[in-house]
Each structure stands twice: as structure tokens, then as C-alpha cells.
């Protein structure tokens, strides 16, 4: 027969064996997010944060889920908290920049995409997003520079050729715009016919 004191000790030890960590809740939340169970994912990420208030990943993950639900103020708050905890959290900068872009807060978006690039300069998406933002504020030189960098990283990034063509069009460098249009088409992109008509009109080609 097991002594009573040992039985009690075994019983009391069970919760610590089954206790979930912040990492566990984060993983469960990510799995739920993949299943588009976004509200439940937020609940799991919130549990991760409750266990570890310095869990930058928990805030970034919850921000992504909040953004999917359209809760943009909450998403910005969470990404900002993640960045305060971990200033090298490139994902948080990129996500916050994307939200700012969608809100037409372009200067802040450019700043966040620039931070993302500084942390992870070999990934094309940061340059691509910053280039699109530069195009929105009519800074075509910077946009073309970023899109050229995108294509150095990934020469088959089809949309980068079209977007650079737009930048060249804005700079009145029509031959270069046509070259990028032809390259985009050769890679299988159906180029916007309105843009082609306008490019023909201004270039005389």
C-alpha cells in the first residue's frame, strides 16, 4: 500500500508536470491562427503574455491575429510593445509598417519598413513594401532603388518589374519602363492595360 504522504506528494506534483508555458500557448495560438480560428488564437497569445510579460513573440503573434480581425489599433499597440521588448523584432516592424500603409500613414510605414530592412537586409519583402510606399508618396527615385534591390535578391519577382516600370514612368524614363513591362510579361504577368495605354500615349511607342 502506498503511504498517504507519498500519495499526496504524487497528486500535488501533477499540475506542475502538465503546466503550460508561454511557448506552449504561443504554439497553440499559431496553430489556431492557421485554422482561421482567430479569436481563439488571440486568447492563447494573451495567456502566453500573461505568463511572460516580456514575451515579444506573444505580442507580435497577437498583433497579427488582431490585424486579421481588423482590430488595427490593438495590433499597433501590440507591435509597439513587442518592439519595446525586442528592438530587433523585424516581424513586428514589418507588420506595424503594413498596418500604417493600409491606414495611409506613409511616413511611419516607411520608417518601420526601413527598420525591418536594417535588421534583415537580405529579405526582399521589406524593400518591396517600402518601394510601394515610396510610390504612394511620389518618391519615385527611392522606389526604383528599392525595387532594383528586390530584383537583385530575387530576379524572378514578377511584380517588382511592373512596379519598377511604374516608377520609371513617373520619372519619365519611358524606355526603362517598357523594358520592365516586357520582362514582366515574359515572366507571365498580365500587365494592367490602362497602364500600357498611358505608357504608349506618353512615350509615343
Image (cartoon, rainbow, N blue to C red):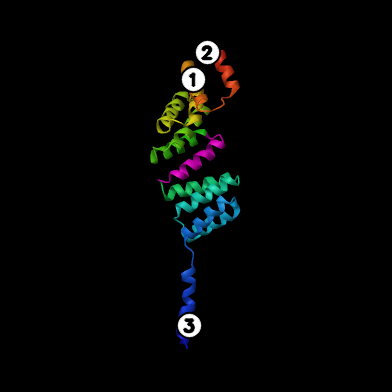
For label 2, the SS is helix
Q: Looking at the picture, does residue 57 appear above or below residue 114?
A: below
For label 3, the SS is helix
| Crowding near the residue tagged with mark 3, few <14, some 14–19, many ≥20 C-alpha atoms within 10 Å | few
Label 1 and label 2: CA atoms lie apart by: 10 Å
Residue 176 sits inside the magenta stretch:
no
User: Which residue shows up at 45% across the image and 25% down it?
Assistant: 144
For label 1, the SS is helix
Identify the residue under disc 3: 7
Tell me residue 55's x, y (percent).
45, 55
Label 2 and label 3: CA atoms lie apart by: 87 Å
Q: Tell me if residue 31 can be seen.
A: yes
Tell me residue 39's x, y (percent).
60, 53
Label 3 and label 1: CA atoms lie apart by: 78 Å
User: Which residue shows up at 46% across the image and 75% down it?
Assistant: 13
Q: Looking at the picture, does residue 63 appear above or below residue 52?
A: above
Marks 3 and 1 in Cβ contact (< 8 Å) = no
Tell me residue 161's x, y (percent).
48, 26
Disc number placed over residue 177 in the picture, else none: 1
Q: Nearer the viewer, residue 47 or 53?
A: 47
- Pointer 2 or 3: first along the chain: 3
Tell me residue 171's x, y (percent).
48, 19
User: Which residue shows up at 60% across the image and 22% down it?
Assistant: 193
Q: Tell me if residue 137 can be seen.
A: no
Which quadrant would residue 40 be assigned to in this image? bottom right
Marks 1 and 2 in Cβ contact (< 8 Å) = yes
Disc number placed over residue 203 in the picture, else none: 2
Residue 90 sits inside the magenta stretch:
yes
Q: Looking at the picture, does residue 50 appear above or below residue 11?
A: above
- Looking at the rendering, the stretch of residues picked out in magenta corresponds to 88-105
Marks 2 and 3 in Cβ contact (< 8 Å) = no
Which quadrant would residue 114 be assigned to in this image? top left
Amino acid at each position: 500500500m502506498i503511504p498517504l504522504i507519498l500519495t499526496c506528494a504524487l497528486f500535488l506534483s501533477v499540475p506542475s508536470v502538465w503546466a503550460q508555458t508561454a511557448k506552449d500557448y504561443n504554439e497553440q495560438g499559431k496553430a489556431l491562427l492557421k485554422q482561421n480560428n482567430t479569436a481563439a488564437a488571440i486568447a492563447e497569445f494573451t495567456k502566453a503574455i500573461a505568463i511572460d510579460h516580456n514575451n515579444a513573440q506573444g505580442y507580435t503573434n497577437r498583433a497579427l491575429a488582431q490585424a486579421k480581425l481588423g482590430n488595427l489599433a490593438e495590433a499597433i499597440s501590440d507591435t509597439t510593445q513587442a518592439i519595446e521588448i525586442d528592438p530587433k523584432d523585424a516581424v513586428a516592424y514589418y507588420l506595424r509598417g503594413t498596418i500604417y500603409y493600409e491606414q495611409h500613414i506613409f511616413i511611419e510605414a516607411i520608417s518601420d519598413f526601413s527598420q525591418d530592412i536594417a535588421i534583415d537586409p537580405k529579405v526582399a519583402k521589406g524593400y518591396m513594401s517600402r518601394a510601394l510606399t515610396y510610390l504612394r508618396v511620389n518618391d519615385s527615385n527611392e522606389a526604383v532603388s528599392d525595387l532594383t534591390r528586390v530584383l537583385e535578391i530575387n530576379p524572378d519577382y514578377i511584380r517588382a518589374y511592373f512596379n519598377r516600370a511604374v516608377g520609371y514612368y513617373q520619372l519619365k524614363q519611358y524606355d526603362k519602363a517598357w523594358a520592365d513591362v516586357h520582362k514582366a510579361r515574359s515572366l507571365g504577368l498580365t500587365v494592367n492595360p490602362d497602364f500600357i495605354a498611358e505608357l504608349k500615349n506618353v512615350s509615343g511607342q
